[in-house]
Every structure is written in C-alpha cells, then in structure tokens.
Image (cartoon, rainbow, N blue to C red):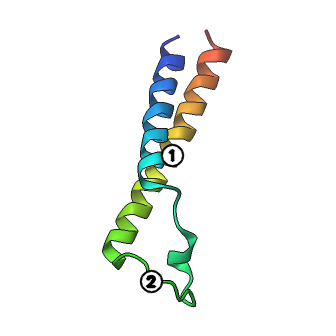
C-alpha cells in the first residue's frame, strides 16, 4: 500500500508540473524553426522542468504497479 500511495503522490506532482510548464517543446531542437520563442536559457529551463514532470509520472506509474503486484 505504501508503494501505491507514493506512486499516486508522484503522479500528482508530475501532473501539476506538466500542467504548469507544458510538454517539452520539440521546436527548440529544430534549427530551421522560424517562430520566435523564449530566450534560450528560459526555454531550456522550462524544457528541463517538463521532462522532470514526465519522469515523475513514469516513476509514479512504476511504483503503483509494484504496489499492485506486491500488496
């Protein structure tokens, strides 16, 4: 039960991060993109935080699976 609860908390934090910062932007890595974006430092910071949110969601999923298989 502890794994399931911890996984749920990680999922909630990951979702909050993703809703606030959005998904990582693939246009940052396209050198031919002509749209104006944020400053390079700000964009990479937001991109890094978004990736951490996805990692939190995946870690929460794995913990919930462990909690389900080994109650």
Q: Which residue lies at the image location 37% right of the left edge and 75% below the top edge?
A: 38
Secondary structure at badge 2 equals loop
Task: Give the vertical position of 43 relative to 36 (above or below).
Answer: above
Which numbered dot is residue 26? none
Task: Give the vertical position of 33 relative to 29 (above or below).
Answer: below
The quadrant where residue 32 appears: bottom right
Q: How many neighbours does mark 1 have within 10 angstroms: few (below 14), some (14-19), or many (20 or more)?
A: some
Secondary structure at badge 1 equals helix
Say which of 28 and 36 sits in front.
36
Q: Which residue lies at the image location 64% right of the left edge and 24% below the top edge?
A: 65
Which numbered dot is residue 55? 1
Q: Position of residue 33 (x, y in %)?
A: 56, 86
Task: Give the vertical position of 60 relative to 47 (above or below).
Answer: above
User: Which dot, 1 or 2, sits closer to the camera?
Assistant: 2
Q: Are marks 1 and 2 in contact (CB under 8 Å)?
A: no
The quadrant where residue 27 appears: bottom right
Q: Which residue lies at the image location 61% right of the left edge and 9% below the top edge?
A: 71
Looking at the image, how many numbered discs can be counted on the residues?
Answer: 2
Q: Earlier in the sequence, mark 1 or mark 2?
A: 2
Q: Position of residue 53 (x, y in %)?
A: 46, 47
**Residue that carries the numbered disc 2 in the rendered image:** 36
Say which of 18 and 4 sits in front.
18
Of all residues, the one furthest to the right in this rendering is 69
Say which of 68 and 31 sits in front.
31
Q: How many neighbours does mark 2 have within 10 angstroms: few (below 14), some (14-19), or many (20 or more)?
A: few
Q: CA distance from mark 1 to mark 2?
A: 28 Å
Q: Position of residue 45 (x, y in %)?
A: 35, 64
């Amino acid at each position: 039960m502890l794994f399931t609860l911890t996984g749920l908390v990680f999922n909630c934090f990951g979702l909050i991060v993703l809703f606030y910062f959005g998904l990582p932007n693939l246009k940052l890595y396209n050198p031919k993109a002509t749209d104006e974006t944020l400053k390079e430092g700000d964009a990479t910071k937001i991109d890094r935080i978004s990736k951490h949110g996805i990692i939190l969601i995946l870690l929460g999923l794995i913990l919930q699976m462990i909690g389900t298989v080994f109650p």
